[in-house]
Image: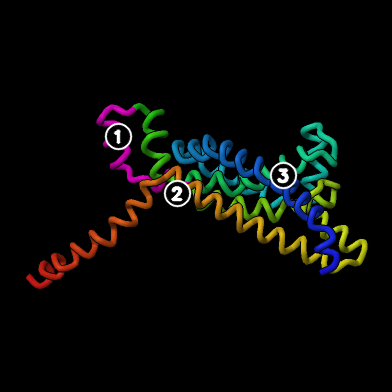
Amino acid sequence: MTWLWSNLDLVWLRTLDHIVLSLPPIVLSFVIALPLGWLANRYRPTRGAILSIAGLFYAIPSLPLLFILPVIIGTSLRSPANLIAALTLYGLALMVRVVADGLASVDPDVRQSATAVGFSAWSRFWLVELPLAGPVLLAGVRVVAVSTVSLATVGAVIGAKSLGSLFTDGFQRGIQVEIITGIVATVLLALVLDGAVVLLGRVLMPWTRRIRRIRPASVAALGPMTVVRGTA
């Protein structure tokens, strides 16, 4: 524990580095996945190809990907942009399917009703389909956030400073407390980001809270009616 109390500033610095590496891939994977997931849902012939290609990204081992990407995108091996690009691809592998499934979960009758009252395809997507698919998308973002925080530790192998640096430094110097600190800090950061995503979802989708409040009351009110009907 002596090492921890003597290096709290280092742990905090590496936590900030980890956040800087984790947040851009979460945002980028969501933004890029929106049009890809929309295409996969809108045009059924493309669904299999888009989802298969996106899913393949997650099958690529992280270390080989980190060594291949600099050749493709022209960054240096130790550049944070290299790690951010890799984490974005992994996030896409998860989010594209989530977006496609979330949009597919919207009731077709709702789409037809929106079109009937004058919504264009563009406004229907932003004002009807996307909000209704919001809870599904939120669940996907939570998974991406936690997995991204976890995968970001791998960047320490190529010299990207993060909480993973505590792992590598602890192994090299034989300081077990440093290793445990890195693990615990990574888990705590993942939990904090997950909670932040949930809070953001509640702010951006306040109607989901109202639906949860209304449902139990409406079910209770309908209960006696259904019993009477069943016995009539």
Disc 1 versus disc 2: nearer the observer:
2
| Residue picked out by circle 1 | 114
Please, what is the three-letter code of the amino acid marked with disc 3?
Answer: Leu
Disc 3 versus disc 1: nearer the observer:
3
Up-down: is 98 above or below 220? above
Left or right: 204 as drawn, with respect to 7: left
Q: SS at mark 1? A: helix
Left or right: 177 as drawn, with respect to 100: right
**Closer to the camera in the image, 45 or 104:** 104
Instruction: Report x, y in % for residue 78.
Output: 85, 41
For disc 1, the neighbor class at 10 Å (few under 14, some 14 to 19, many from 20) is some
Quarter of the image where one finds residue 169: bottom right
Which residue is rendered at x = 48% and y = 44% of the image?
A: 100
Magenta stretch encompasses residue 125: no
| Residue picked out by circle 3 | 21
| Residue picked out by circle 2 | 202
Counting residues from the start of the chain, the first of labels 3 and 1 encountered is 3
